[in-house]
Amino acid sequence: MEQRTVVGRFGGPEVVEHVSHPGPAPRRGRVRVRVTHASVGSTDVLARRGGYLLQPTPGFTPGYDLVGVLETTTPDAAAQGLTVGTRVAACLPRMGSHTTSVLVSPRSLVAVPDALPSEVAAALPLDAVTAGLAFRLARLSPGDPLLVQGASGPVGSLITQRAVAAGHPVLGTASLANRGTVESFGATWLDYRDPGLVARVRAATAGGAAAAVDHTGSNEVRAAVASGGTVVRLSFVGRPGRERRDTFTGSLATLSRAAARPRERLVSVPAFVATRPDRARALLAGELARIVRGELRAPAVEVLPFADARAAHARVDRGLAGAKLVLAM
């Protein structure tokens, strides 16, 4: 059985290409999923540029998210209710979803609710697991205020909605253009470019937020959090050409502050999925269910044909405000 796969090399969108090759040979403990949809996000673009710490060499297949149809099963899969023909979603422990067929452990798979369109479900796994894990690591008590950096983005919006629904006052940073989005979640908008941002947070929270979820790696965030609080780091904005080095050093700094005041916690979804697949699967299933019940607002989705993967990378390079881009195989 032949399959088509995207191969990413280091450079601009023009380096993205498709290759045809035989499908994966069966492996013990793995099931085969025919991929129907896979999202293209900022991590995929960063990897293609050569700046992603977990993808240090070119010639890789991008993509953590997928939705597809189960083509083979195992006793473990059957025990989870996953039979041939089941529509499934996954956040993979390593990149490789931009292809027409994958072998994956059934422990990474969840059944997609019937009410959730495949293109929407494909936009969620990595972001939903990131948001759910970050919310847990924030260790909020009832009524605690939360600062969310990038509250209008794919991950920040999910965290913001979860926190507001749980009764936490949320201060969300975003651009002026996205103020309405942040406020529509029930959060207080703050301009991320405001030089007095830290002072505003401390004034609004009587001395500092109980926790902050940050995707920048900035040390200024620590000053916006109360001494006994938590800074949850999702990523680090590296200098051009030094993204991998800056991510590595930023991660080490965060790990070294595990017992500091405020403490810091690092979110690494690939490591979480690889080492705690059952917890990751349960978290993803719960987040998809919340979307279906209307407790969380799913992101807007734009769909492109799989053949247009290069154009998809170019689109994400330019920025997709408020939307996720999904490839349809």
Image (cartoon, rainbow, N blue to C red):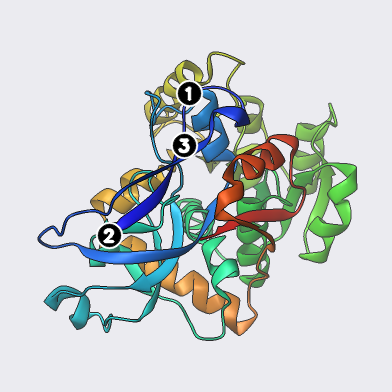
Q: State which quarter of the image contains the N terminus.
A: bottom left
Residue 124 visible in rendering: yes
Amino acid, disc 1: Gly
Within 10 angstroms of label 1, few (less than 14), some, or many (20 or more) residues?
many
Residue 144 visible in the picture = no
> Which one is closest to the eye, mark 3 or mark 1?
1
Residue 56 coordinates in the image, percent (x, y)? 38, 24
Is 171 in front, or is 38?
A: 38
Is 323 left, or right, of 59 in this rendering?
right
- The mark nearer the N terminus, 3 or 1, is 1
Helix, strand or loop for disc 1: helix
Q: Position of residue 174 (x, y in %)?
A: 79, 44
Disc 3 from disc 2: Cα separation: 51 Å
Q: Which residue is mark 1?
A: 250
The residue that appears at 74% across and 51% down in the rendered structure is 171
Which residue is disc 2 drawn over? 1
Q: CA distance from mark 3 to mark 1?
A: 14 Å
Nearer-N-terminus badge (1/2)? 2
The residue depicted at 83 percent of the width and 50 percent of the height is: 189
Q: Which residue is mark 3?
A: 263
Left or right for 124, reference 249: right
**Depicted 19 relative to depicted 2: above or below:** above
Disc with the residue nearer the chain's start (3 vs 2): 2
Q: Amino acid at mark 2?
A: Met
